């Protein structure tokens, strides 16, 4: 799984705990410890799910949730409210400002993970499905195998992540910076030219002979998985359900 989750939590130990357990599930996780900083960051990039503490410095979780629901780009963002407040009236208040679910501290980590998985299953099914299909390419997240027209492709770990990232959003153009964040992560520094190198390796691994190159270079912008390639289906490829960005 490579869904991106933002955790807004000012308790450092809890932030570390949440990051560790969510990353163990395969999610890409960012932890922010202030509500006002989270407000700025969420204007720049919208994650797949937000875990939001009730009480935060700078801007409360309740107010941040209210603001997010007023913006078009975040009005449907799945939000899980996390708080020590357990009274029924406070739960109702959290849900009334737009939270989708509510977990009271102290909480069971397996239960929180199950709630996150359920929310993503409803809002981003393509991010948790074990199978991704684009054209005649099939990617299996569980076995880490990729096949094209029935033949198995030999991809390195980074090339696999790149292919998975592209297949989740066919047609969407990603800048080199976005690919660095989505595939390598914000905590690892690599040069943007590294993206070009690995895209080149990916192309070499997936294309043979006169096969159509599914990776499209957009001059001055970045790279994308060609949506026309994604929509096509080779008769020789295994018959599996096709996933697209809006699946």
Image (tube, rainbow, N blue to C red):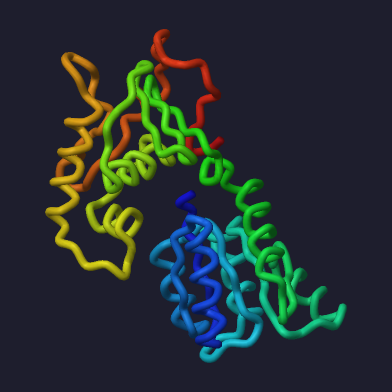
Residue 117 placement, left or right of 170: right
The residue lying at 78 percent from left, 76 percent from top is: 93
Q: Is residue 136 above or below residue 21?
A: above
Give the percent coordinates (x, y) of residue 163: 33, 39
Q: Is residue 72 visible?
A: no
Q: How many marks?
A: 0
The residue lying at 55 percent from left, 63 percent from top is: 71
- Quadrant for the C terminus, please: top right
Give the percent coordinates (x, y) of residue 133: 45, 28
The quarter holding residue 149 reads top left
Give the percent coordinates (x, y) of residue 40: 43, 75
Q: Nearer the viewer, residue 67 or 79?
A: 79
Q: Residue furthest front?
A: 143
The quarter holding residue 234 reads top left
Residue 53 placement, left or right of 157: right
Residue 109 placement, left or right of 241: right
Q: Is residue 45 above or below residue 241?
A: below
The residue lying at 24 percent from left, 42 percent from top is: 223
Residue 132 placement, left or right of 200: right
Give the percent coordinates (x, y) of residue 112: 67, 66
Q: Is residue 138 above or below residue 165?
A: above
The residue lying at 17 percent from left, 31 percent from top is: 204
Q: Is residue 50 visible?
A: yes
Q: Nearer the viewer, residue 111 or 32?
A: 111
Q: Is residue 25 above or below residue 137?
A: below
Q: Residue furthest top?
A: 235
Q: Nearer the viewer, residue 130 or 123?
A: 130
Q: Residue furthest bottom?
A: 57
The quarter holding residue 69 reads bottom right
């Amino acid at each position: 799984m490579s869904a991106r989750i933002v955790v807004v939590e000012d308790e450092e130990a809890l932030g570390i705990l949440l990051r560790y357990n969510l990353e163990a599930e395969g999610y890409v996780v960012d932890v922010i410890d202030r509500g006002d900083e989270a407000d700025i960051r969420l204007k720049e990039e919208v994650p797949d799910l937000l875990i939001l503490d009730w009480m935060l410095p700078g801007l409360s979780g309740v107010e941040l949730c209210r603001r997010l629901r007023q913006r078009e780009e975040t009005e449907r963002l799945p939000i899980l409210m996390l708080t020590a407040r357990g009274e029924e009236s406070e739960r109702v208040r959290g849900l009334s400002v737009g939270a989708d679910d509510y977990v009271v501290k102290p909480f069971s980590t397996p239960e929180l993970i199950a709630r996150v998985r359920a929310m993503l299953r409803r809002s981003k099914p393509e991010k948790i499905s074990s199978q991704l299909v684009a054209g005649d390419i099939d990617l299996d997240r569980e076995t880490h195998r990729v096949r094209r027209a029935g033949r198995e492709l030999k991809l390195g770990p980074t090339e696999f992540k790149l292919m998975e990232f592209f297949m989740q959003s066919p047609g969407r153009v990603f800048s080199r910076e976005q690919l660095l964040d989505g595939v390598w992560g914000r905590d690892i520094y690599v040069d943007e030219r590294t993206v070009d190198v690995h895209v080149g390796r990916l192309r070499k691994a997936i294309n043979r002979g006169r096969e159509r190159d599914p990776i499209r270079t957009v001059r001055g912008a970045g790279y994308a998985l060609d949506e026309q390639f994604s929509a096509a289906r080779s008769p020789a490829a295994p018959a599996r359900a096709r996933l697209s960005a809006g699946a």
